[in-house]
Amino acid sequence: MLKVNGRLIDVPYSGLTARVNFGQDIVDTIRVNQLDVPVYINTSGIVKGLPDPQDDTIYIASRLVAEYVRRPDVLCPNKAPGHVDRDSYGRPRSVDSLLAYE
């Protein structure tokens, strides 16, 4: 849900959910409370569920998808401090803007 200038805007859901599936490689282990914890990096990724660009269409996806594809038509909710309205339990209710990764 977007809330801009006090107005709530309900963005229609396409029925698709875009995801990035990453391969991972272990790069290190760190010692935490006497346990060895593996540290991985994400390697190549495959995006699933994201349509090709279309004229006059934007896609609102997760930050991970938007940052990975870096397309001008793929945006994510701006959850930076000061841009998200949260309920009394801290759960996001709305944001006031979208974020681009180009």
Image (spheres, rainbow, N blue to C red):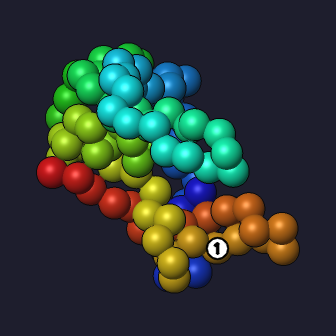
| Residue in view at x 39 percent, y 41 percent | 64
Q: Is residue 23 visible?
A: yes
| Residue in view at x 51 percent, y 82 percent | 82
| Residue in view at x 49 percent, y 23 percent | 16
Instruction: Give the secondary structure at mark 1.
Output: strand
Where 91 sits versus 80, above or below? above
| Residue in view at x 57 percent, y 71 percent | 84
Residue 40 location, quadrant: top left
The residue lying furthest to the right in this view is 88
Residue 52 location, quadrant: top left
Is 28 displayed left or right of 85 in the figure?
left
Identify which residue, 95 or 20, lies in the foreground.
20
Is 16 displayed left or right of 71 in the figure?
right
- Check disc 1 and report the residue beneath it: 85
Identified by mark 1, the residue type is Asp
Number of numbered markers: 1
Is 91 displayed left or right of 39 in the figure?
right
Is 35 displayed left or right of 50 in the figure?
right
Q: Position of residue 69 (x, y in %)?
A: 23, 35
Q: Position of residue 57 (x, y in %)?
A: 28, 39
Report the quarter where the N terminus lies: bottom right
Where 71 sits versus 9, above or below? above
Q: Position of residue 77 (x, y in %)?
A: 46, 57
Q: Is residue 50 visible?
A: no
Q: Residues within 10 Å of mark 1 (few under 14, many from 20)?
A: some
Identify which residue, 12 or 31, lies in the foreground.
31
